[in-house]
Amino acid sequence: MVTIRLENLRKTFGDVVATDHVNMELQEAELSTLLGPSGCGKTTLLRLIAGFYEPDRGRVFFDDKEMTYIPPNKRNTGMCFQNYALWPHMSVFDNIAYGLKIKRVKGMKYTGSAIRRRVDEALGLVQMDALGERTPHQLSGGQQQRVALARALAIEPDVLLLDEPLSNLDAKLRIEMREEIIRIQKELSITTVYVTHDQHEALSISDRVAVMDHGYVQQFDTPREIYANPQTIFVADFIGQCTFVEGKIEKTGSTLQVRLTDGQPISGVTTVHGYPFEEGEDVKCAIRPENLFLERSSQEDNQITGKVTRTIYIGNGLEVYFSVGDIPAQALLDPDLKLTPGDEITFYAPVRDVMVLPLGGVHALRKIPGHPMASAEGPSVTT
Ligand SMILES: Nc1ncnc2c1ncn2[C@@H]1O[C@H](COP(=O)(O)OP(=O)(O)OP(=O)(O)O)[C@@H](O)[C@H]1O
Ligand SMILES: [Mg+2]
């Protein structure tokens, strides 16, 4: 079992900064995902871990061993690419055996019988025992995906790297394969890095999620922590739904008082611990739909009034879209409520559920003493 440590990694392609200032420790035997929109640097980071790219700056460690400039075939990683990359003219068996035939352990080759045993084991793991003699074009997409996974696993890698492995599968197969990957990953206790742009997939599969945007890892934490305590506006917006209202800090303290742009006061708490808010500072307040209530539960609750614009019945709830001034907002209410567009509606939001976030995205985190971003260079950007 291997812990992967990434130190201050940066990779550029000409003028494009594909990823920068990546500092993270991927725990042994855990499944960590790299999650973010297209072009945010997920594949680049995965390839830096695999050794297909050398970084412009920074270092890669597997446990205490520095791997930064070690070639991919010497890292003992199993990799699954988005497009499977199976060899079409080879049987399933030979596709899986290939990595074993070229692998040397302490300079020694695997024997034919050892290869056969390993391939059979790998086929068993992905439940493809009977299909070893077929060629890839005689397999369905899901079966090809399984072969690609078996091939990555056969060499008994220390690290498993999966780049959007389910993107070519239909919805039902995706869920089946997702469960399969979790089962195998837990059974083998193999440190795994999984790339996806699908937040639902990331939340359901991961021990920890790295939310990426514009090349930066904005937050790396458990799904629960990321949802409950987003560190940037991007993370709050990308994971789950949120209503955002803008304003200026009027009073700092453990409860932050904010004056919204339309003059209404709102009180909240921050999820960005240690961030030094200042009076007069522009901020955004984020509220999850499930934290807006039609009844007041405490005297301190915030009161928010708006106009219903649309409702969507989703079986176990009613998604209510409304506007507060010209700000679009959303709440999740009881499915039996009867609401019509144009209705005026008043919500109550507990102070602890109003998340006050600084502007400036990941760069704002530099203001937190001792935060890993504190040493990051580069211009400040706003979100
Ligand atoms: N070989 C390359 N040459 C030039 N630019 C590249 C190269 N590879 C990636 N990039 C650029 O680096 C940035 C990050 O790309 P990357 O492939 O890591 O994104 P991604 O998050 O994997 O996106 P997707 O979800 O679309 O696969 C993008 O702007 C991309 O255009
Ligand atoms: Mg990619």
Image: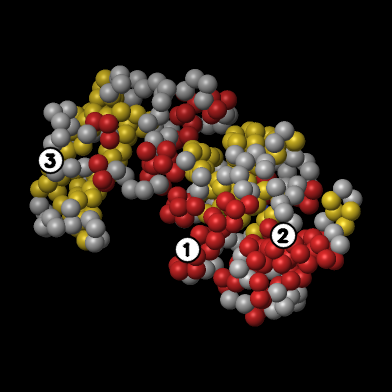
Q: Is residue 283 above or below residue 292?
A: above
Residue at the image position 53 percent from the left and 63 percent from the top = 177
| CA–CA distance in space, label 2 to label 3 | 57 Å
Q: Mark on residue 175?
A: 1
Residue picked out by circle 2: 154
For this orientation, the residue located farthest to the right is: 107
Q: Nearer the viewer, residue 38 or 89?
A: 89
Which of 224/380 is in front?
Answer: 224
CA distance separating discs 1 and 3: 38 Å
Where residue 80 appears, as percent x and y from the top left, is: 65, 59
Q: Secondary structure at mark 1?
A: helix
| Image-based side of 111 in relation to 285, left or right | right
Q: Residue at x 47, y 63 (%)?
A: 175
Q: Is residue 246 visible?
A: no
Frontmost residue, 272 versus 293: 293
Q: Nearer the viewer, mark 2 or mark 3?
A: 2
Kind of residue sitting beneath label 2? Ala
Q: Quadrant of the N terminus?
A: top right
What SS does tag 3 mark?
loop
Q: Position of residue 162 (x, y in %)?
A: 61, 55
